[in-house]
Image (cartoon, helix red, strand yellow):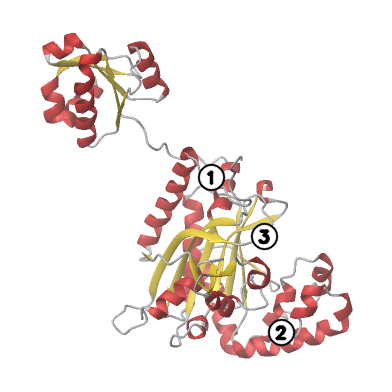
Amino acid sequence: MKYQRPKGTADILPDEAANWSYVESVAKELFAKYRFQEIRTPMFENFEVFSRSAGDTSDIVTKEMYDFHDKGDRHITLRPEGTAGVVRAFVENKLYGPEQIKPVKLYYMGPMFRYERPQSGRLREFHQIGVEAFGSESANLDVEVIAMGIHLLQKLGLKNLKLVINSLGDQETRAAYRKALIDYLEPHFDELSDDSKERLHRNPLRVLDSKDKNDQKLVANAPSILDYLTPESQQHFSTVKQLLEDLNIPYEVDASMVRGLDYYNHTIFEIMAHDKVLGEGDVTVCAGGRYNGLVEELGGPQTPGIGFGLGVERLLLLMQAQQVALPETNALDVYVVGIGQETKAETLKLVEAVRQAGYSADQDYLDRKPKAQFKTANRLNAKVVMTVGAEELAQQVVNLKVMATGVEQQVALEDVYQNFPKLLANFLKQ
């Protein structure tokens, strides 16, 4: 039997994993500057965590979730997104308590799971980096989160980015708009897709997010939610737009954008990139928004929240397409060449000494001839080769060679063991 990875998954091989680590390290460094702290939640949750938060009419709940009953007959779901699990942890661990400094700023990284048709940058097991901030309704926080998402993508070297924003308003806004949208769509009921027919009276905003081409034509002239914003919602959205302008962050308003999850309200946004590697037109790389009722929905006190998520696979594809230069990782400082069986113990001691001094080091493990060892050192782009044979061992010395210049020098073994950093620095200056 030939064993293969499950459809919709991928093996992240060492060369690729280095790029993943780089993206994660850049994100962690940036999030720390904005005072966000890491949180790690389980990869599976109770089904209701997602069905209550994402909405029972969303594609995630109705079509895409990996859910099953475990041996205790508990209804379990592999997490399809990160926000609901973080909110559940926020509530369960009482991170809303009076001792917590508000807003509580959290970030997460890890795998998510959705049963959908695999395509470029979108697998059934995919990885997200996301942030969540709880405890403030301030438009300043909305803009800070948006700015942080843009800043992250720019730090990773991406170009041709576009910010699109909208407001979904408050509950009063949603109620008024819901009625207007149903009134507009009901005369076209027979023309709607089966999914949209089912959603029309349960959650008509889902029709705006339909991927069906005929549905998209029908909603093209639908009422705009921006015309139904309450004065408070209008003020919040106006402040967000003004603050973006104050930060010189260009944006577009798309009144038809609703996002794919039911918990959003007020500000929502998508950061898009234009690149054919992800398909025709503008493709979303990072997206999020405000969800002021989600904490209460999952059993906590009234607590506003806002966040974003981005897919790492899609991000790396885009970085590759835009030829972003990634830093060299796992560079080899020293390769130790041992000549003869009697040097085996000394070569092991040398590589360990170099590592203990804070440098990377490697050696031959296959009993190869010196020429083959030098060839390997060259293939590995070793900065320095350290050679020891029977004669050097007798004299308690080693030979150093800078591979880039060919400069060589013989040094005492004791100097390697006692003060390698200084020895190497002086040698490389020659």
Measured in 3D between alpha carbons, the distance from the residue under mark 1 to the one under mark 3, in whole angstroms, is 18 Å
Q: Which residue is mark 2?
A: 202
Name the spot of residue 226 as percent of width and height, x first: 67, 80
Q: Mark 1 vs mark 2: which is more N-terminal? A: 1
Q: Nearer the viewer, residue 333 or 250?
A: 333
Q: Which numbered disc, 1 or 2, marks the residue closer to the eye?
A: 1
Q: Are marks 1 and 3 in contact (CB under 8 Å)?
A: no
Residue 333 in the figure: left or right of residue 179? left
- Residue 116: numbered disc: 3
Residue at image coords 33%, 22%: 364
Q: Which residue is mark 1?
A: 11
Name the spot of residue 379 as percent of width and height, x first: 42, 22
**What quarter of the picture does the C terminus occupy?**
top left
Give the residue type that dot 3 points to. Answer: Glu
Give the residue type that dot 1 points to. Answer: Asp
Residue 165 in the figure: left or right of residue 144? right
Q: Nearer the viewer, residue 300 or 157?
A: 300
Q: Mark 1 vs mark 3: which is more N-terminal? A: 1
Measured in 3D between alpha carbons, the distance from the residue under mark 3 to the one under mark 2, in whole angstroms, is 23 Å
Within-10-Å neighbours for mark 2: few <14, some 14–19, many 20+: some
Q: Mark 3 vs mark 2: which is more N-terminal? A: 3
Within-10-Å neighbours for mark 1: few <14, some 14–19, many 20+: few
Q: Are marks 1 and 2 in contact (CB under 8 Å)?
A: no
| 129 to 352, vertically: above or below | below
Residue at image coords 57%, 47%: 10
Q: Is residue 3 visible?
A: yes
